[in-house]
Amino acid sequence: MLINQNSKHKMDGVTVLKTVVTLFENLPGQIDAAMPEFVGVLLAELQVLLSKKKPVEIYQSMVLQSLALAFFNNAPLTFQIMEKHQMTVPVFQSWLGFMEKFRLEFELRRVIFGMISILRCGPNDMPAVV
C-alpha cells in the first residue's frame, strides 16, 4: 500500500486513511495478518509528518486516528509492530501532543476507543515504556 505524497493538501492520503479506518473499525481482530503492513505504512507516514516543519494538520489527524484504531483492532499486535519499528515513543508523543486538536465527535470516539483498548491490555502485552 502506498500513499501519494504529492497530492494537494494530502487529500489522497486522507481518502486512503478513511478506508483504513473503516477496516479497523469494522474488523477488529479479523485482519491480524495484514496489520504489520497497515501499521507499517501509518508509522512511515507519521515519520514523514514528524520531519516536516508544518505538517498538514488534517492528514496528521487521520494518521493518528488510524493508529488509535489499530490499537482498537488489536492492541498487543500494534504494540509489537511499533516496537519492531522503534516508534512507540514517537507515536505516543505525537498522539498526546495532538490531543487538543481532536474536536469532532468521531475523532474523539476513535481516540477513546484506542485508549480504552490500551488500558485493557495486560502488562505483558505492552512495552515497559508505556
Image (cartoon, rainbow, N blue to C red):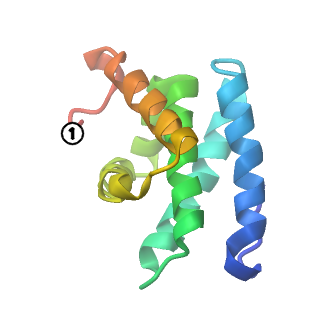
Judged from this view, the residue extending furthest toward the left is 129
**What's the residue at 26%, 18% (across, down)?**
123
Q: Does residue 126 appear to the left or right of 29 in the view shown?
A: left
The image position of residue 44, as x and y in percent, is 56, 61
- The residue that label 1 is drawn on is 129
Query: How many numbered discs sit on the rendered protein?
Result: 1
Q: Quadrant of residue 14?
A: bottom right
Secondary element type, mark 1 = loop
Q: Quadrant of residue 128?
A: top left
The amino acid type of the residue labelled 1 equals: Val
Query: In this orientation, does residue 80 appear?
Result: no
The image position of residue 117, as x and y in percent, is 43, 23
Is residue 60 positioned above or below 20 on the image? below
**What's the residue at 45%, 51% (across, down)?**
103
The quarter of the picture where the C terminus appears is: top left
Is residue 80 positioned above or below 93 on the image? above
The image position of residue 83, as x and y in percent, is 39, 42
The image position of residue 119, as x and y in percent, is 32, 21
The quarter of the picture where the N terminus appears is: bottom right
Query: In this orientation, does residue 83 appear?
Result: yes
Is residue 58 positioned above or below 54 on the image? above
Is residue 19 positioned above or below 58 on the image? above
**What's the residue at 44%, 78% (across, down)?**
51
